[in-house]
Image (cartoon, rainbow, N blue to C red):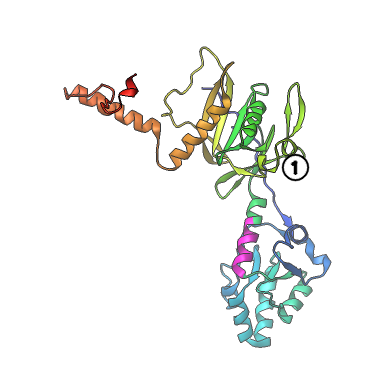
Amino acid sequence: MAESRLKDIKILHRERLLVRDFFCRYGKDLQMACHSSDSSLDAPIAESGIHRPGLAMAGYTKVYSSQQIQVVGHTEWNYLESIGHEGRVKVFEGLTEFKAPMWVVTHAQNPHAELREMCERKGIPLFSTTLHTYEFIKLSQRILEEFFAPHAIIHGSLVDVYGVGMLYIGDSNVGKSECVLDLVESGHRMVADDVVHISNVGRSIIGRPDPLIKHHMEIRGVGILDIRSMFGIHAIRKQKKIEAIVELQQWRQDGSYDRTGLNGAAEEIMGVKIPKIVIPVAPGKNLTVISEVIAMNILMKMNGQNVAEDFNEALMQKIKAKAKGEYVDDLLDFDPQNWSYYE
């Protein structure tokens, strides 16, 4: 078996995100307002988690996740209201000693004066948002998970076929781009060609196009094509989960190829196993139809139907029955009411 093409990809990690960049990029989507001086916004965010400091406010700081963004929700707000000015001073004096990357007050509440004073004194960024606590945590955590996710760059093409993300890999002259172009012409959607940026988000491998190349494609002998301009907005996608790897190989007489679909070959990318299909490329082979069949077969497996296993099981039952001397009907189904079938 040939060595994996994806075995030695270089995996990269982002170590931190400045609060300033987080606010500039995502502040509008998160409906955030800043209550801090500009100098405090260079604090780094180093973790993707979001923490609600309810227990810490009550005095239990043994497992306080101080390196995460601190969110003051409706529950924490009501508690702070109940303990009065002196209680809030004591709480925030203690918690701001931990130097969290930033504090966020949700539900369009105005941050307490005590929290403002402590954050300003210790250079901790303070924000408010009109979003509810659950909404803010959900959105910001997704943003941070994607930002800090392990990522890499792969030479290949990614296309959405019937909702299945299919990553095409292979030699540079094997016909990946031509196959994807034919799929787009058939109504499927291209994500990336030649360069695919991948990341591991929540145990799913997500593929995106290169920011410079985007929806462009190179076809030898033709040049650079703009898929969006030629086929319309419906012909492209910004990202797609990779659910199958299709390796295109030049057909060889001595090549070993799966002919039953029972081997369950898979490729591991960033610790996630993805089904892999090797397709021998030969003149006259319709890779577009084969790709569509691969996608439909994957969809059937997702719905609990494995044709290869079902066929193998039926075959084994017949073999066992014959071995026991039992009667096995090997004739084709005969329907006397439908004579035209035999004409």
**For residue 342, above or below residue 107:** above
Residue at left offset 21%, top offset 26%: 321
In this view of the protein, which residue sits in the foreground, 273 or 120? 273
Q: Residue 44, position in %: x, y?
A: 73, 59
Q: Which residue is mark 1?
A: 211
In this view of the protein, which residue sits in the foreground, 210 or 115? 210
Residue 134 is a magenta residue? yes
In this view of the protein, which residue sits in the foreground, 181 or 169? 181
Residue at left offset 63%, top offset 29%: 182
Give the quarter of the image for residue 317.
Answer: top left
Left or right, 37 with respect to 126, comes to right
Q: What residue type is disc 1 on?
A: Pro
Give the quarter of the image for residue 20.
Answer: bottom right
Q: Residue furthest right?
A: 38
Left or right, 111 with respect to 78, comes to right
What is the span of residues highlighted in magenta in the rendered image?
Answer: 133-142
Residue at left offset 28%, top offset 26%: 333
Q: Quadrant of the C terminus?
A: top left
In this view of the protein, which residue sits in the foreground, 267 or 315? 315
Left or right, 211 with respect to 243, comes to right
Residue at left offset 75%, top offset 77%: 116
Q: Residue furthest left?
A: 325
Q: Residue 96, position in %: x, y?
A: 69, 72
Asked if one can make out residue 65 in the rendered structure from this viewpoint, the answer is no
Q: Residue 3, position in %: x, y?
A: 56, 25
Residue 325 is a magenta residue? no
Asked if one can make out residue 123 in the rendered structure from this viewpoint, the answer is yes
**For residue 204, above or below residue 25:** above
Q: Give the structural element (helix, strand or loop) at label 1.
A: loop
